[in-house]
Image: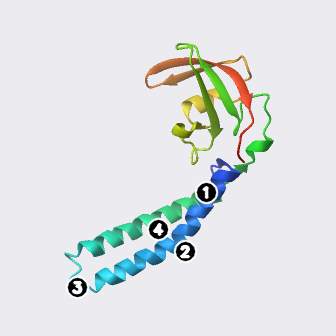
């Protein structure tokens, strides 16, 4: 069975844009770089040629990866999810029961999670622990640094699709 990858409409579009850019722009640039480097003679010691070939390998690898992820995408409109429990796309405010600090995370797919911007993967330990919880529920997360306990303070809608 194909493992689906949950992602928001915005995250899906970001991957589609990257794929299109790689296929329509980057591929052409790297092919030209290889041609130019080839004209410089001996390919064995031609660092420019080897760098361009390596870049080409990275581009082609990323294209394959993006096509795979997009083919397995389960697109979820974050504006249409329920707010009774924590689900993909919701913004969750948690109270750290050890430090009394509040943290806010949006639950997104692994491809779009970015802790610095306040989003975490629904597949991460804390993301999995939060799923299906309601306001007032306790969330226990086992991390490499030990057990952490939170309380769900608020569940809000996303600010993007």
Mark on residue 49? none
From the viewer's side, name the closer residue of 9 and 100. 100
Q: CA distance from mark 3 to mark 2?
A: 28 Å
Q: Is residue 1 visible?
A: no
Residue 4 vertical position relative to residue 108 in the rendered view, above or below: below
Relative placement, left or right, of 29 versus 127 is left
Residue 43 at x, y percent in the picture? 24, 79
Residue pointed to by mark 3: 41
Q: Earlier in the sequence, mark 4 or mark 2?
A: 2
Tell me the SS state at disc 4.
helix
Residue sitting at x 57%, y 42%: 113
The quarter of the displayed image where residue 23 is located: bottom right
Mark on residue 60? 4
Residue pointed to by mark 1: 14
Tell me the SS state at disc 2.
helix
Residue 136 at x, y percent in the picture? 72, 16
Q: CA distance from mark 2 to mark 1?
A: 15 Å
Q: Earlier in the sequence, mark 4 or mark 1?
A: 1
Report crowding for label 3: few under 14, some 14 to 19, many 20 or more residues within 10 A (C-alpha): few
Q: CA distance from mark 3 to mark 1?
A: 40 Å
Front label number (3 vs 4) = 3
Residue pointed to by mark 2: 24
Q: CA distance from mark 4 to mark 2?
A: 12 Å
Q: Earlier in the sequence, mark 2 or mark 1?
A: 1
Q: Earlier in the sequence, mark 3 or mark 4?
A: 3
Report crowding for label 1: few under 14, some 14 to 19, many 20 or more residues within 10 A (C-alpha): some
From the viewer's side, name the closer residue of 113 and 101. 101
Tell me the SS state at disc 3.
loop
Relative placement, left or right, of 129 versus 75 is left
Residue 112 vertical position relative to residue 124 in the rendered view, above or below: below
Q: CA distance from mark 3 to mark 4?
A: 25 Å
CB within 8 Å, label 4 to label 1 = no
């Amino acid at each position: 069975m194909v493992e689906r990858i949950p992602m928001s409409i915005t995250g899906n579009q970001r991957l589609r844009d990257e794929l299109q850019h790689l296929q329509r722009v980057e591929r052409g640039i790297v092919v030209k770089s290889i041609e130019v480097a080839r004209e410089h003679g001996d390919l064995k010691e031609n660092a420019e040629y080897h760098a361009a070939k390596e870049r080409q390998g990275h581009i082609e690898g990323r294209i394959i990866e993006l096509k795979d992820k997009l083919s397995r995408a389960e697109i979820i409109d974050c504006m249409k999810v329920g707010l009774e429990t924590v689900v993909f796309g919701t913004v969750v405010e948690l109270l750290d029961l050890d430090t009394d600090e509040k943290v806010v995370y949006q639950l997104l797919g692994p491809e779009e999670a970015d802790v610095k911007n306040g989003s975490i993967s629904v597949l991460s330990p804390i993301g999995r622990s939060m799923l299906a919880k309601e306001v007032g529920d306790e969330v226990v997360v086992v991390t490499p640094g030990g057990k952490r306990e939170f309380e769900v303070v608020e569940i809000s809608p996303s600010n993007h699709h």
